[in-house]
Amino acid sequence: MRTNQFESMKESEKINYSGNHLLGERKGMAPAAKRAAALLIAAAVAAGALTACGGASGAGAGTADSGQDSTGAAKENGAQGEVIELTNVSYDPTRELYAAYNQIFEPYYKELTGQEVVVTQSHGGSGKQALEVSNGLEADVVTLALEGDVQVVADAGLIDDGFTSEFPLDSSPYTSTIVFLVRSGNPKKIYDWDDLIRDDVGVITPNPKTSGGAMWNYLAAWYYFEQQGQSEEEILESIRKLYGNVVVLDSGARGATTSFVENGQGDVLLAWENEAFLSLKEYPGEYEIVVPSVSILCQPTVAVVDEVARKHGTEDAAAEYLSYLYSDEAQVIEAQNFYRPSTQEIYEEYVADTDSNTITEIPADGHWINDNIVLTDITHFGGWSEARSKHFADGAYFDQIYEQ
Amino acid sequence: MKLRNNSGPAKWILILLVSIFLAVFLILPLVYILMTALGRGLGVYRAAVTDPYAVKALLLTLRATLWAVAVNTLFGIAAAWCLTKYAFRGKKIISTLIDLPVTVSPIIAGLIYVLTFGRQSFLYPILDSRGIQIIFAVPGIILATIFVTFPFISRELIPVLTAQGTDEEEAAALMGAGTWTIFRRVTFPHIKWALLYGIVLCTARAMGEFGAVSVLSGHLRGKTNTLPLYIELLYQGYDFTGAFAASSLLVIMAVIVLILRIFLEHRGKKELDLHK
Amino acid sequence: MKPVKNKSIIPGFGLSFGLTITILSLVVLLPLCSLVVFTLKLTPSEFLYTITRPRVLSGYRVSILTALAASLVNAVMGLVMAWVLVRYEFPGKKIIDGIIELPFALPTAVAGISLTHLTTTNGWVGKIFYERFGIRIAYTRLGITIALIFIGIPFVVRSVQPVLEKVDLQYEEAAMILGADRRTTFLRVIFPEILPSLISGFTLAFARSIGEYGSVVFIAGNTPYETEIAPLLIMSELQEFDYTAATSIALVMLAIAFVILSVNAVLQSIVSRRVSGLA
């Protein structure tokens, strides 16, 4: 790549610095003017270089980029025939779900409107994703782990009020819950939440301060101890013990699963139900799911990011994208990816007929939903903003249990 | 010459020490990556590295790297020239500011661009009305890459230019040579090897940047996922083979760059010897 | 070297200065200013409270302690490596010389992932340590230190190596002829020459390690007060939508980096003065 320069360098080195060659080049300009001109050129070059990366990003000379500068594409999107691009910003465990869902949505929408649509996915910690959307990540729709995270986007002025009533069932097309994943044979005999505070048990759960899923874990544990009739101090003490048993406090749900599954840490993983089943599927025979007596109904919330969709002219496609999540086809895909579908008939189809709370393998008949569980939900904790300020804000309960 | 051909036990003990250290800290992780990448056979490996998303991520990484190298080369030469050939106030401050990016946490590097170009910044309405998006888009990734590799080239050039002094340039200037001529004929021959080394370092570091880019990329699959981010994505999707296969691409690229460097350095030394 | 005059006759000041300042402002200064502006939204007492909460203080402590340990290891090993590479000929030297920059090129996340896999109680290395000595590496401060050693390897070697190459063998030979033994020769003749570069390599490695995130977050285990590093706290403040708290901590880290660089600058001038005073 640089060999040409080598050749010329060699030549230049042969030249002695007698100065004869150098004379007569570039005189004439007054020094002051020259300096000013040079400064200008420099600034222009630098600014040009930096803004050019902006310009280049769309067309991307020679790169296989599909040529979308999310900003420039806005206007054309309205026109028929052009491909509409939707960006769905979601949380970590939904990768497989939306990969499958997008495959049925794209042909469905083509058939419905004659319009071609391509969905781009983004996955990450729910809170982080919400923050990025509030900060200008141009998502047409968000499908996050909890209502509180969608609220953050709404607070930034990007989502119109009343997003929880925009779609059926508080805008959560599928739900999940928190279960335990233990090693095959359940060697530590872990059956319920009180087993987690035994001295010999190592627990893996992500950090509620950095992970949406981990907040559900914490609240589910809280609910259990509350059901045992403990006072608030006693609950706090139990929770302190539980987190004292935590071996690795990962920053996200997927990281926690990796620590438990891949790196062999701890005896029990507090996991989203769908994550736990995914581990059973990926590593057959190595793990078991234990469904505790009580847990919490996790309601992931979806919403159209109105302001972005308006700007892109994708409001209709975005709304259709989310309402199609409630269709029977989509509900089946959600159930197949181990989310609890919200349509009652489909839900019933997947309920297992069993009294056991231990699941050692994915049921061959597909009936994986275990109904022997009492589920509370976030309203028990007074909604997300109250739960956040009481438990997870700086200096709140979660910080207190780590104080020494 | 007795010292040069030192071959006492000390020599071998030290060499052994270095070899063990590097074997444990550098080679072992690499071997682990390659073994996991090839763990399920060549077919799986080939499928993993030719996945369209992997290819897009690779191209984006290369693009960001090229931009970073180009901007930093321009900046490195200008800054090194400016700091070594002239005396002016504020030189120390500029010099420290140039170094700062290396010591700034990559997280902070990403954060400052989010703060500067994000929705809550006063710049956002201006940029947005022109349809320019910086963060969560390719320009932001390029900016972050430039930032983390900012001093790499200038830091290589400054010591060389300092050692060389200003006499030759002054002589040339007295004889009436213009800026470009002086640079090309007098200065450039002195700095070319240092420049090359800087470029190699800059390339290597730019390819692997993770933290800063992660903060401002938005992780849009196929659009703003660089190779390191793509690796993280695969890793978290339980696709360890794919993740390590993609990592091996980076390892291979890094090794190529480093071999290139040894080769060029060798040539450079030979050239230098000829001149002596 | 001739002192540079204020009014240099070399042309091109405008061009080079203009370019330098423009790029520097766009890439470094402007973003850093927005960090400061953002932090100014807090009152001084709020700011102080944010940056001195026990959890945050412990984050700084973990970051600084592990970075210090890793940089010390790297200083010693870097010196040895530079010595071996400059003074000895042996088969495979080129390879060693070539791979030293690898930690720069490998994404920190990849390094973190593979180091974690190697050092957990099931990993190739971690197993030996756990079963033989009962030492856990991954998910402890030891693990963090290991990750930081990895990313800091190139700094010391690459700053000492070129200086060591220039140390004139004649001085050493003279010292030996005058009856100095190897140790004295090294300590009195060579060491003072390379000390400035050693310090600067050490401080760079140290500063870089304090801010490291990508590799550490996988191996650290992130237990509050134990293995939670300061950059992770910034991330967790961000997740809590607390931009001001995140930027406050970031500002402190930035100040630490700036102080480290300044200390380095001061040490450089002291040491080089002492060396030239001796010479």
Image (spheres, coloured by chain):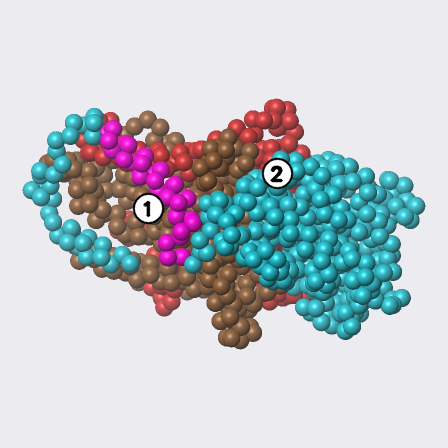
Q: Is residue A48 above or below residue A376?
A: above
Q: Which residue is mark 2?
A: A158
Highlighted range, magenta: A35-63
- Find residue B73 and name its label: 1
Identify which residue, A258 or C200, lies in the foreground: A258
Horizontal arrangement in the rendering, residue B164 relative to residue A242 (left or right): left
Q: Colour of chain C?
A: red
Helix, strand or loop under label 2 = loop
Q: Which chain is brown?
A: B
Q: Residue at x 47, y 42 (%)?
A: B134
Q: Which chain is cyan?
A: A
Chain hosting mark 1: B
Q: Is residue B103 visible?
A: no
Q: Is A148 a magenta residue?
A: no
Image-based side of C262 in relation to A308, left or right: left
Q: Secondary structure at mark 1?
A: helix
